[in-house]
Image (cartoon, rainbow, N blue to C red):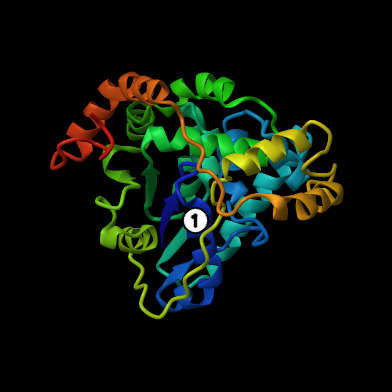
Amino acid sequence: MKAFIHIGMPKTGSSTIQSFLKINADALRGQGIRHDPVNPRFGSQYELATAGLVRAGDTMSDSVALRVLGLHDPDAQRAYVDAFEARLQQGRRAWGEQVYLGSSEHIHAWLTKAEQIRALDDLLQRHFDGVQYLVYLRPQTEMVVSAYSERIRRGETLSFEDHFNSRLRTLNYWKSLRLWARVVGEDRITPRLLTPDALVGGDLLDDFCAQAGIDRAGLKTPRRMNTSLSAEAIALRRRLNQFLKVRNRHGARAKPYQLALRLLEPRLPRPGTRLQMSEGQRRRILADHAEGNEKLRARYFPERAVLFPTDD
């Protein structure tokens, strides 16, 4: 049995991919593909990213994940990873499929050191005959805006300017791809571009199915997941975030916050104003990542004139 692992990145349609896998899990088994998250309630398979951290001697620090999973101390995180590995051991004895298919955007977000990536890969290699990794890359100009929407959705209150300045250096795709390639090997990490002209059929799910060896015919299509907030919705939530918690201490969505949204969101314009950065900010991002993007294009996408259509 081989493993095929989608590692994100965040804000590249990962929620849509995970919803697709969830609603088609039974049909996929008929195609010889096993999707087996520890907790199907979550989209992202936290167990994969946590395994890389814990096996490398680190601990989880994502505040939302800590509350959602209830893993507040290192012992609990180690027990979580041990249970996941036991699940793989038992599954390998019982599963009859040819492919184990996993998906977690937290892998790319959390595993930023060679030893963390190696720890996850070593664990998977112990249980599977081969492991392949897939990552989607979205234009940095889009990522900055979308990531800000997600931070506000999670309960933060910072301004877009502060977010912009803090995120510029985290979007060096070339550096990230070279790290993964050095650890797992060039032939086991596949980058794909999240732009219509680069995707199979111009569609994310068509492209994902092509990479994972899935026949999409007859499979269900989920609704679009986790779309970005409008500028008006961001302004509303930033205000609410100053006084209310998005989640309670158990990690569930806080009822007062949800009630406030139900009362106030209907008053917002529909569809609302799309959040946009200034032209100066856009040019700064393009300049900041021009060298890395060109190296990435030349190595992985030599047929393209530029990496992303918005490059200039």
Which amino acid, mark 1? Answer: Gly
- Give percent across and percent down for residue 231: 58, 39
Point out the image quarter for the C terminus: top left
* Label 1 environment density (alpha carbons within 10 Å; few <14, some 14–19, many ≥20): many
- Give percent across and percent down for residue 128: 44, 55
Viewer-closest of 217 and 245: 245
x 53%, y 48%: residue: 104
Could you tell me if residue 119 is visible in this image?
no
Against 309, is 164 above or below? above
- Give percent across and percent down for residue 289: 33, 23
Viewer-closest of 28 and 166: 166
x 46%, y 25%: residue: 170
Which residue is denoted by mark 1 in the rendering? 102
- Give percent across and percent down for residue 11: 49, 44
Label 1, secondary structure: give it.
Answer: strand
Point out the image quarter for the N terminus: bottom left
x 26%, y 32%: residue: 311
